[in-house]
Amino acid sequence: MRRLILRDLALAVRAGGGFGLGLSFFLIVVVLVPFALGPDTSVLSGIAPGVLWLGALLSCLLSLDRIFALDYEDGTLDLLACAPIPLEGVVIAKACAHWLTTGLPLTLAAPVLGVLLNLPVPGFWWLVVSLALGTPALSMIGAFGAALTVGIRRGGLLLSLLVLPLYVPTLIFGAEVARRGAERLDLGVPLALLAGVTGAVVALLPFASAGALRINLR
Amino acid sequence: MSLWEYANPTRFMATTRRIVPVVAVLSALCLAVGLVWGFFFTPDDYRQGSTVKIIYIHVPSAMMAINAWAMMLVASLIWLVRRHHVSALAARAAAPVGAVMTLIALITGAIWGQPMWGTWWAWDPRLTSFLILFLFYLGYVALWSAIEDPDIAADLTSVLCIVGSVFAMLSRYAVNFWNQGLHQGASLSMDREEHVADVFYYPLLLAIAGFVLLFVTLVLVRTRTEIRARRLHALQMRARMA
C-alpha cells in the first residue's frame, strides 16, 4: 500500500501529472473573486472563508478523474485488482495519494490566499483546521465518483455532476467552521460534525468505491 | 406462488397489461375529483385566501418526489441482491418521474411562496434540501444514460442510489443545521399537515391518492417501454449475428 501511494505521488509530481494544476486553479479563483465583487475589503473579509472553501472544493474536483482513469486505460487497475491487497485498500491508497497531492497543498496554500481576501486574523487557524479535516472527505468522495465513472469516455463532466451534490454536507460544515472561526463564535458543533462526516466517509466509502470498480472491471 | 414470479419479464408484461388501464383510470378519477373539489368547493383560507389551493398539487408532488427515490432505493437493492432485470428497469423508469415531481413541488412552492412570503425563493431548509434532491435525480439519470452496457449501468446506478440516499439524508440534516446557523429560526415553512382543517383534508387525501396512482401508472408504462426496448435490442443483435 505504501508503494502504491509512493508510485501515485511520483506519477503526479512528474511532468503531465497535473500536480500544480489544482493549486493554480485555486489561486485564479481567489484572484477572480475581487474582480467580480469589487475590492471593498469589508465585503471580502466577510465572504473570505466561504470563497476559500468553495475554491478549494472546485480545485479538488479538477484532478479527480486522474485517480483511476489512467490506470484503467493502461490495464494497471486490472493488475491491482488481482494484487494480494484488497481492492478497498487500493481505493484508500489512491484517495490518500490524491489528498497528498491536492488536499494538503490546498490546505497549506489557503492561509496565503486568505491574506488576499483580507481574512480576519482569528480565521486563519480555523480555516486550516477545517480544510485539513474536510479535504480527506473530498478526496474519498471524489474517489467514489471516479470509480463510478471510470469506464466512461470523457466522463469528467458527469463526474462533477455526480460528486458535487455529495460534497454538500462537507462544504456546509467546513465553511461553517471557517466562518465561525473568523467571527470568533463557538464552533464546537460544526467542527465535530465535520470530523464525523469525514470519519464516516473514509470508513465506509472505500467499500462502495471498490464495489463500483469491480463492476467496471467485470 | 411467490411475489418473485413477477420478476419474470413475460409474466410482468402479462400482468401489467391488465393492471395499467385500471390504475390509469383510477388515477385520472382521483385527480379529477380531488382537484376539482379542492379548487372549487373548498372555502378560502382566512389568512392565505385562495392561494392555499395550490396545496392540492404542491403537497402530493412533494410526497411523491421523496417516495419515488425510496422506491428507486428498494428496487436498486432488489436488483443488487436478486438480479431481477425488471427491478433495475423499474428504478430506471422511476427516476425521471421523480425528478419531474421534485420540479413540480419546487415550482408550485415558488408560486405559492411569492404571495405568501413575498419571495419566489428563500434558502429555507426544506426548499434547499429539495433542490439538492433534484440534483441527485439529475446525476442518477445522467449516469444511466452515459453507460452503454445495460447490466453495468444498472449495477453502478444502484450503488449510486444507495450512497446517494445516505448523502441525501445527511444533506437534509446538514442544511437544517446550516440555516439555523445563519438566521435564527426563520420558520418560513410550517408543518402543514397538522394545521389542515377537515374541509381541506379530504380533497387533499384524494389528490395524494391520485398522485400515487399517477406515479404507479407512469412507472409501469415506462418499465413496459424499457422491457420492449430491451427485447427489441436483443432481437436486433440476434438478426445482426445471423
Image (cartoon, rainbow, N blue to C red):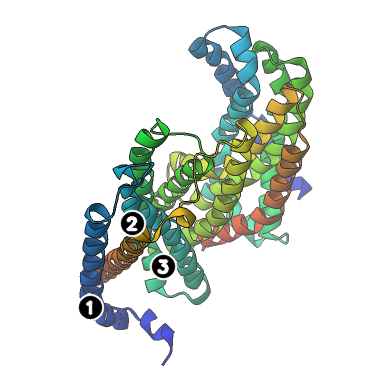
Q: Give the mark, 3 or 1, whose residue is nearer the N terminus.
A: 1
Q: Give the mark, 2 or 3, whose residue is nearer the N terminus.
A: 3
Residue at x 32% of width, y 42% of height: B49
Residue at x 60% of width, y 58% of height: A208
Where does label 3 land, which residue?
B88
Where does label 1 land, which residue?
B17
Inspect the image, locate mark 1, and give the three-letter code of the amino acid beneath it: Arg
Callout 1: helix, strand or loop?
A: helix
The image quarter containing residue B6 is bottom left
Callout 2: helix, strand or loop?
A: helix
Q: Which subunit holds the residue at mark 3?
A: B
Q: Which subunit holds the residue at mark 2?
A: B
| B44 left or right of B67 in image | left
Picture coordinates of residue A80 (x, y %)?
65, 55
The residue mark sitting in front, 3 or 1, is 1
| B216 left or right of A41 in image | left
Label 1 and label 2 in one chain:
yes
Inspect the image, locate mark 3, and give the three-letter code of the amino acid beneath it: Ala
Judge the density around disc 2: few (<14), some (14-19), many (≥20) Cα neighbours within 10 Å.
Answer: many
Residue at x 49% of width, y 59% of height: B156
